Image (cartoon, grey):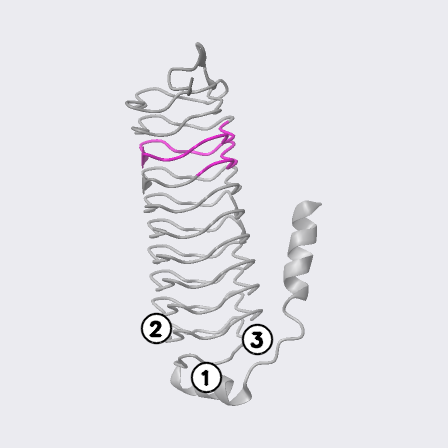
Amino acid sequence: MRKLILISALLFSFNGLAYNETDLAKFKVLNACMDCDLSGADLSNANFTGAVLTGANLEGANLSNAILFDANLKSANFTGANLTGANLSYANLDSANLDRAVLTGANLTSATLIGATLENVFSLDADLTATNLSYANLSGAVLERASLTGAILFDADFSSATLIGAVLERAVSLDANFTGARLTGANLSDSMFLGVDLTGANLIGANFTGADLTGANLTGVDFTFAVNLRNTNLDSAKFCKTQMPWGEVNDDCAE
């Protein structure tokens, strides 16, 4: 029910936004329109390979199934935009705002989203393989069954994010924030999560085979129902009220 309400709210957000007709005409001719207003525009099913939309306002735009392969979308505003099934592979989305955007089935393979905002973004089955999400804000994001294989997550904020069934195999992270995140059934095998904060994260059914959690904050984490911890590196990890298969570990609780 929560998901249906969220999707409905996002789709309704497309209404009431007026794009600049001159900007839209210019973009369609040149495949480039920096700092232009395309808010609420219907750009679905179109091919915009290599487009340049740096700083553009695409709030509430319909980009479902659009091809934005290798596009320069740096600092663009995609707030509430519909990117269902869009191809954003190799796109530059650094510092872009995708707050409340819908990315279900979108392809962001090898895209860069350094410093981007994906707060409250909604996605099912999105492909973020090898994406660079360093310093990105994904707090409250819903990324169920998303593929983040080989993703770079340096200092990214996934607090309270939902990553149920997500694949983070071979993902690389340093000091990322996963506090309160839902990683139920997620695959983190062979991932490198150095110094990551997993305080209170839900890891039921998660697979950590061969993962490196050196220096991770595992306060309040329950590994009892994790699928596999074989060859997991927990050196220098912080244990406090941490539920391990052999019992509760409180080695690092403040006195």
| Residue at left offset 40%, top offset 75% | 53
Compare marks 3 and 1 and give the one earlier in the sequence.
1
Q: Is residue 210 magenta?
A: no
**Front-most of residues 8 and 109:** 8
The kind of secondary structure the magenta stretch mainly shows is loop
> x and y percent of residue 221 in the render?
47, 25
Give the alpha-carbon distance from disc 2 to disc 3, as whole Å.
19 Å
Q: Residues within 10 Å of mark 2 (few under 14, many from 20)?
A: some
| Residue at left offset 43%, top offset 32% | 198
What residue is shown with label 1? 28
Compare marks 2 and 3 and give the one earlier in the sequence.
3
Give the alpha-carbon distance from disc 2 to disc 1, as whole Å.
13 Å
How many discs mark residues in the rendered view? 3
Q: Where are the magenta residues, as a range?
A: 178-203
Q: Quadrant of the C terminus?
A: top left
Compare marks 2 and 1 and give the one earlier in the sequence.
1
Q: Label 2, secondary structure: give it.
A: loop
Q: Label 1, secondary structure: give it.
A: helix
